[in-house]
Amino acid sequence: MQCAVIEFARNVLGLKDAHSREMNPATSNPVIDLLEAQKNISHMGGTMRLGAYPCRLEENTLAYSIYGKKETTERHRHRYEFNNEYLPKFKEAGMKLSGINPEAGLVEIIELSNHPFFIGVQFHPEYKSTVEKPHPLFVAFVKATITK
C-alpha cells in the first residue's frame, strides 16, 4: 500500500517529491510518515505497531465485497502509516480509502475503482493465511486474474 500511495501522489496528485519518511526523511511531501506515537522514541526495539487491529470496511467497495462484512481484524508489524494530512487530496483525486482503523483513524486499505482489481493494504494478510485457508485477499486476487 505504501508504494502505491507514493506513486499515486507523484503521478496523479502531481507531488513529484512525495515519498515515505522511512526512505527519504527530508521529503517535503511525506505521504507515508512515522506514526505520531513513534516520533519521540529513540530506542526502536519492540516499539512498532504490532499485532491485530480492527479495520472498518466501507460498504460498496472491493474490500467490503471480498470480506463480506463491515469489520475485520488484521495483523500489523510496522512504524510508518498513510499521512492523514493528505486524505482530502487523495479522496478528491479518486482514491478510495476503503478500510480504516476505527480507533486511530489510520488508513488500512486503499482502492482505485477505475481499475479491475486495485487494492493495497497496510497490514500483512500473509500472517493470517495458510495453505488450507488462504487469506480472502489472495483468493479474490487469484479469482480476478482468472475472470477478468
Image: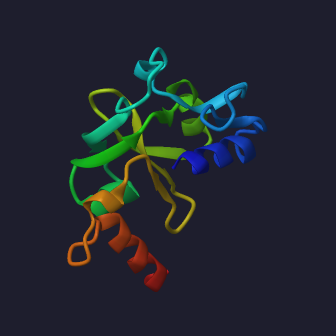
* Coloring basis for residues: rainbow
Q: Position of residue 62 (x, y in %)?
A: 39, 59
Camera-side residue of 93 and 8: 8
Q: Position of residue 44 (x, y in %)?
A: 44, 28
On screen, residue 48 versus residue 102, left or right, reads right
Let me know if residue 58 appears in the view. no
Let me know if residue 146 appears in the view. yes
Camera-side residue of 25 and 74: 25
Q: Position of residue 89 (x, y in %)?
A: 61, 32
On screen, residue 69 versus residue 98, left or right, reads left
Name the residue: 72% across, 28% down: 27
Name the residue: 62% across, 31% down: 21
Is residue 13 placed above or below 136 in the rendered structure?
above
Q: Position of residue 34 (x, y in %)?
A: 51, 28
Camera-side residue of 79 and 87: 79
On screen, residue 78 versus residue 15, left or right, reads left
Q: How many marks?
A: 0
Name the residue: 45% across, 34% down: 79
Is residue 20 placed above or below 72 in the rendered structure?
above
Is residue 29 placed above or below 3 in the rendered structure?
above
Camera-side residue of 26 and 18: 26
The residue sitting at the top extreme is 40
Rendered image quadrant of residue 37: top left
The residue sitting at the bottom extreme is 146
